[in-house]
């Protein structure tokens, strides 16, 4: 829309100028009339009255005509504004009238132009705000998804591993099923049935919570993944998350630290007059299927396979305070820990006995 400039209306004469001219004429005419009368030697009263009446009438008509014309211009201006406003079109008022009316139209057009510019700016800002709101909604949704993923991961691994997974966005590590080599650790409280029979339910739960808390801290500290709690037993996986290449070492190290943490826990419980216990740990390395197993309503991230079964069997052989490992774990940690051969065991579905080894927690030289 092209707005009319102020110069477009300069042709109109000023209302103030017109009134001045009329006032001058009304003042000049009586003066001329007086001069005329004095120039006449004889003039009747009737002639004087007629002349003054005509002069008064002329003044009244001139003032009325001037005011009427000015009022008509105002009416025309109001009508034009009303028509264009009701039509819903941009208003550009053009008046060929007195200068004051033209000035009002000019000021009105300038005001409308600024309002139109403000409206366009507000629309642009509204669009920008809508874009910001959309981006904020997407960011909020993404943050909620990341929070849900973080909470889900924290059920299985420590904060350091979670941070690494969040940076790499490697959610597939917990959603895809795959066959891979990993190390499985089982830790179990010895004589738990007998101990639990002598305690109240609250005391049993409190004892388990203390043990599980210590176990989870050790597992997470050594880059392990918490698989599940099975009664009084803990199952942990080492190796499902890349790029940990020394998973057998981490598993054995976690087992040693867990035995030491349990001993410290028992010292504290003994000082408090509470029941104490020992744990046995079994570890095995091998190929297993890792992924989510279960139903649509309930899924568990776990590992299944012969290597997992052997780790559970080794845990059953371990006495209180012992750590028993399988052959592959022994070979991959050779020279890193103090280890001695424990013997051979017969395992279901295997024709030959399986050798097992004990991890010692003293300063003796390794014995093979």
Image (cartoon, rainbow, N blue to C red):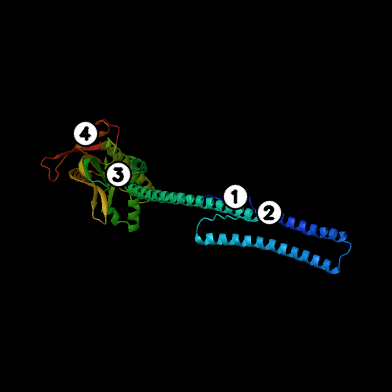
Q: Is residue 49 left or right of residue 342?
A: right
Q: To which residue does mark 3 refer?
A: 225
Residue furthest to the right in view is 41
Marks 3 and 2, how far apart at CA: 92 Å
Instruction: State which quarter of the image contains the C terminus.
Output: top left
Q: Is residue 46 visible?
A: yes
Q: To which residue does mark 4 refer?
A: 331
Marks 4 and 3, how far apart at CA: 22 Å
Q: To which residue does mark 1 refer?
A: 8
The percent position of residue 137, horizontal first and vertical second, equals 41, 51
Q: Is residue 272 visible?
A: no
Q: Are marks 4 and 3 in contact (CB under 8 Å)?
A: no
The percent position of residue 36, horizontal first and vertical second, equals 84, 59
Marks 1 and 4, how far apart at CA: 100 Å
Give the structural element (helix, strand or loop) at label 4: helix
Marks 1 and 3, how far apart at CA: 83 Å
């Amino acid at each position: 829309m092209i707005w009319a400039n102020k110069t477009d209306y300069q042709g109109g004469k000023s209302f103030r100028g017109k009134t001045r001219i009329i006032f001058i004429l009304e003042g000049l005419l009586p003066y001329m009339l007086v001069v005329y009368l004095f120039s006449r030697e004889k003039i009747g009263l009737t002639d004087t009255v007629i002349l003054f009446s005509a002069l008064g009438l002329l003044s009244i008509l001139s003032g009325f005509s001037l005011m009427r014309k000015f009022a008509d211009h105002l009416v025309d201006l109001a009508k034009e504004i009303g028509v264009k406003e009701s039509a819903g079109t941009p208003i550009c008022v053009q008046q060929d009238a007195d200068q004051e009316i033209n000035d009002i139209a000019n000021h009105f057009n300038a005001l409308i132009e600024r309002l139109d510019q403000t409206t366009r700016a507000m629309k642009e800002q509204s669009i920008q705000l809508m874009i910001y709101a959309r981006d904020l909604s997407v960011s909020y949704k993404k943050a909620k998804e990341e929070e849900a993923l973080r909470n889900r991961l924290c059920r299985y691994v420590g904060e350091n591993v979670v941070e690494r997974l969040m940076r790499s966005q490697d959610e597939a590590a917990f959603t895809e099923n795959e066959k891979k080599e990993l190390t499985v650790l089982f830790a179990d409280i010895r004589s738990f049935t007998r101990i639990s029979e002598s305690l109240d339910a609250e005391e049993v739960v409190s004892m388990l919570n203390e043990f599980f808390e210590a176990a989870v801290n050790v597992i997470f500290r050594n880059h392990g993944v918490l698989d599940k709690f099975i009664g009084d037993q803990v199952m942990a996986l080492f190796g499902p998350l890349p790029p940990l290449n020394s998973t057998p070492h981490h598993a054995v190290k976690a087992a040693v630290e867990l035995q030491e943490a349990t001993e410290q826990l028992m010292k504290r419980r003994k000082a408090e007059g509470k029941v104490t216990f020992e744990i046995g740990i079994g570890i095995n390395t091998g190929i297993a299927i890792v992924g989510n197993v279960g139903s649509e309503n309930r899924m568990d991230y776990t590992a299944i396979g012969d290597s997992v079964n052997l780790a559970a069997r080794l845990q059953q052989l371990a006495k209180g305070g012992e750590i028993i490992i399988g052959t592959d774990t022994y070979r991959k940690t050779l020279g890193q820990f103090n280890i001695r051969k424990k013997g051979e065991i017969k395992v279901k579905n295997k024709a030959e006995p399986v050798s097992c080894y004990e991890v010692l927690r003293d300063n003796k030289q390794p014995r093979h």
